[in-house]
Image (spheres, coloured by chain):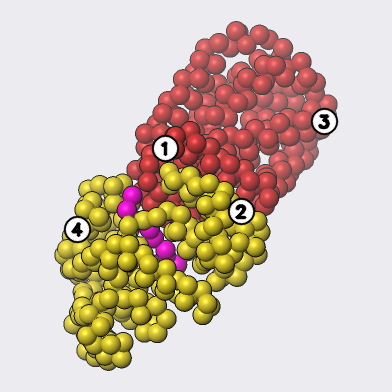
Chain colours: A red, B yellow
Amino acid sequence: MTYAQRAFIVLWKDVVTERRSKATLNALLFFSLMLLFLFQFTLGGDRERLVSALPGLLWLGFVLSGLVGLGRTFLLERENDCWDGLLLTPGDKSAIYLGKVAGNLLLMLVVEVILLALFALFFNVDVARALPALSLVLPLGTVGFAAVGTLFAVMTAHVRAREVLFPVLLLPVEVPVLLASVKATEAALAGEPLSAVAPWLQLLVAADVVYLVAGVLTFDALLEG
Amino acid sequence: MRGLRKAFGRHLVLDGVDLDVGHGEAVALLGANGAGKTTLLRVAATLVRPTSGRVLVGGADGGRDPEAARRHLGFLGHGTWLYEDLTAYENLRFWATLGGRPASASALRAALAAVELERWGDERVRQFSAGMKRRVSIARLLIAQPRVLLLDEPFTGLDQRSAKWLEEHLQAFKSAGGAVLMSTHSFGRGFGVADRAAILAGGRIAADVAVASLGSEGVRRLYEVTVEDGP
């Protein structure tokens, strides 16, 4: 059994479970809609303010909905003591981590695409011309977010105050990813070439690699607790 | 297990447990509520680190090399390890693949048939009764083919027919050289499988006797005396 097959079975399980229960997706979509209404209410029809704030608002929406989704990553494993099963399963545990990251990435990307479409609809913004650039920036930003989020989700899964601790731990570490993502999204929405924000994209790629490697190396120890 | 101690904060649950389970042997672990049976099984399964002492599973040191110990282990605790929104078949497929023993569809169906759930294989586990979920967990163990079984009250929730089947399966597992350590409250169902009874009281093995020499009634009396008097 290869490492990739073990990672894939974790991803498959999370996707099938979510597709059937829709527990996280429904919560995230509802949460996203609430955010949109709130933004719409605050910004009203001031188009100039809206355009300048849009990249930040988009990522604020992604981050807040991501926090809700990532925080639930290991709740499923606590049900029926499945966590024990993951622990006792022989083999490299980092395959479980990568499967979980892939599952979170998929879920977050689905929510981001829906949020983006809703933003375009609610605020009457033309995002179509920015789509090629965004299709690079959004996954890059989300990989970093999911990589660290999955790691901190396992760290805090058994902590009593995890709802408080999880974002407190996660957000400071995500600062480089968020700054780079917002800058790159700003350029994409303004119709600028991504080469104009190459240093930010490089930072994003570097952060993704560092966070993923750190996750692969430390997940086993964190799962053991 | 040698000199096994486990404390949760100031509360000492296990206080120097020595216990051997040989090949082809089943040991029933008896003890009052809170005596530490579940803790002992979880330490033996490498799920909980002991405060001190040593656990060897199939020659592998559970403390130093839990990964090696886990390759020999099959564990059935209070939790079923089942994902409620997956079917019974999908649950078995998941654990078999993750455990590095990918089983063919026919092998998975055969395991479900062995626990008389072949008709329910494609139903979501969420719809199952507690006894049916327990049987799926047992099917998971069948596929994993461990050499050592650690079972925490395995007969709980099973009907007469399933309990009888499990007894027969455990007898066959022993005959094939497997080792079984199972906690139980009952001197009836499943007790017939046990070769020895180890009574846990005061954090230690207060008595370790051959079931054949005393009979289940004799073990019951010894249990009552031991648990009432303490070690």
Q: Residue at x 70, y 21 (%)?
A: A52
Where on the picture, by quarter, is residue B171? bottom left
Q: Are marks 3 and 4 on the same chain?
A: no
Residue B73 included in the magenta stretch of the image = yes
Q: Nearer the viewer, mark 3 or mark 4?
A: 4
Gap between marks 3 and 4 measured at Cα: 63 Å
Q: For this rendering, which residue is in front, B36 or A92? A: A92
Decide whether residue A194 is among the magenta residues: no
Q: Which residue is mark 3?
A: A121
Amino acid type for the residue under numbered disc 2: Leu
Please check whether the numbered discs 2 and 1 fall on a single chain: no
The percent coordinates of residue B121 (x first, y second) are 62, 58
Is label 4 in a helix, a strand or a loop? strand
Determine the CA span between mark 3 and mark 1: 40 Å
> x, y percentage for residue B221?
27, 91
Q: Residue at x 32, y 53 (%)?
A: B72
